[in-house]
Image: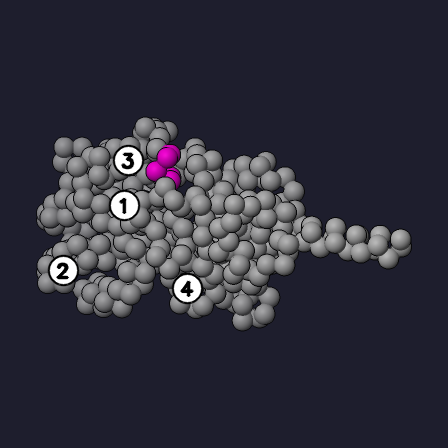
Amino acid sequence: MRGLSSLAALLLIASSLPALALTEPEIAAYKGADRQKILEEGARKEGAVTFYTGMIVDQATRPLLAAFQKKYPYVKADYWRGDSRAIIQKVLAEVRNGNPLADVAESSGLSEPLVQAGVVEPFTSPELATYDPKYLDPRHLYGPSRLSYFATAYNTRLVPKEAAPKSYEALLDPKWKGKIAWRVDSDSGSALFIANLRLAWGEAKADAYMKRFAAQNIISFDGSARTLVNRVMEGEYPLAVNIFAHHPLISARAGAPVDSILMDPVASVSGTVLLLKNARHPYAAMLLIDFILSKEGQETLKHSDYFPSNPAVEPDDYLKPIVPGPNGFTENYLRPEALYEQSDKTQALFDKYFN
């Protein structure tokens, strides 16, 4: 009897451990009907997940993780916040030291450098079934966590609405000489401005434009996107190109003298969420990725003034005027891998006229 009892106990234990027998690639790729059950059982045992993100902490990261932990109270979600370059450096340094800490990483301009470094695990998520295919990665190496559209910001006290430049050609008017700023320390600044026009117009037209644009004595700004918009609000710069289109609208709601102008084609990029290889908490990591991509997670980001990527979640009404398609503008979605592949040519054009 004692032997039978021991055998029964072993079988009971074994039946409770199928989830933990899976490898990280198997967890990431699992599509079975019991997927949610397996992820939750594994996450309960892990009890934690670590998230590296470029999202603003108080505005988005904390509300997002609070909503996640409310749904999965047995998972403690830790985070570290930095810009994309800082996240890349931190992840790769940890890998080199043999001590990877992050399970999930999220930001814009993040995915392809980490993919090329070989530290990203392919994954599948049922949440992606409803997404626009143009935002998806056929390699299954990232999911689109949020969208960003880019525009020109202008100070409404210095520049009346009717006088504001409404096209890239209008930026070449001599009256704007020495009055236009752009970010030069970020992939979402001058580099994205140039890449957008290169890929939309072709090399010859983009080169000719940049030569004329450089003659406008463009002001190089070394700082965050939010800080540049603040400088426009303060009147230091009348115009700033290739800023996140929603930033001025957020400030304008609070009474700041600033607004956004879309110019055709409108550059867009997606933030990307990644599962990192050798994650310490792969079950909880997949629960977090699913949550970020889900309608519930996207609603949380929407209420944090981010553009949702899930088509089931519309942006707030005050942000709808800067969604390109419905407002008659061409959206030029710049895939992370395309930006990475084109980075040398984009840098060469910048160096030719602006460095």
Assess disc 4: are there few (<14), some (14-19) or many (≥20) residues with their C-alpha within 10 Å of its C-alpha. Answer: some
Pick the front one: 206 or 30: 30
Disc 4 residue type (three-letter): Val
Between the residue at mark 3 and the residue at mark 2, the CA separation in whole angstroms equals: 32 Å
Residue 310 higher or lower than 139, as above or below: above
- N-terminal of the pair, mark 1 or mark 2, is 1
**Furthest-right residue in view?**
2
Between the residue at mark 4 and the residue at mark 3, the CA separation in whole angstroms equals: 38 Å
Q: Which residues are magenta?
A: 308-313
Q: Which residue is mark 4?
A: 115
- N-terminal of the pair, mark 2 or mark 4, is 4
Quadrant showing the C terminus? bottom left
- Where in the figure is residue 268, as x and y percent of width and height? 28, 48
- Where in the figure is residue 154, as x and y percent of width and height? 24, 39
Depth-wise, is mark 4 or mark 3 nearer the camera?
4
Between the residue at mark 1 and the residue at mark 2, the CA separation in whole angstroms equals: 19 Å
Per the image, label 2 sits on a secondary structure element best described as: loop
Q: Which residue is mark 3?
A: 258
Depth-wise, is mark 3 or mark 2 nearer the camera?
2
Q: Which residue is mark 2?
A: 202
> Can see residue 62?
no
Pick the front one: 347 or 133: 133
Disc 3 residue type (three-letter): Val
Number of disc labels: 4
Per the image, label 4 sits on a secondary structure element best described as: helix
Between the residue at mark 4 and the residue at mark 1, the CA separation in whole angstroms equals: 25 Å
Disc 2 residue type (three-letter): Gly
Per the image, label 3 sits on a secondary structure element best described as: strand
- N-terminal of the pair, mark 3 or mark 1, is 1
- N-terminal of the pair, mark 4 or mark 1, is 4
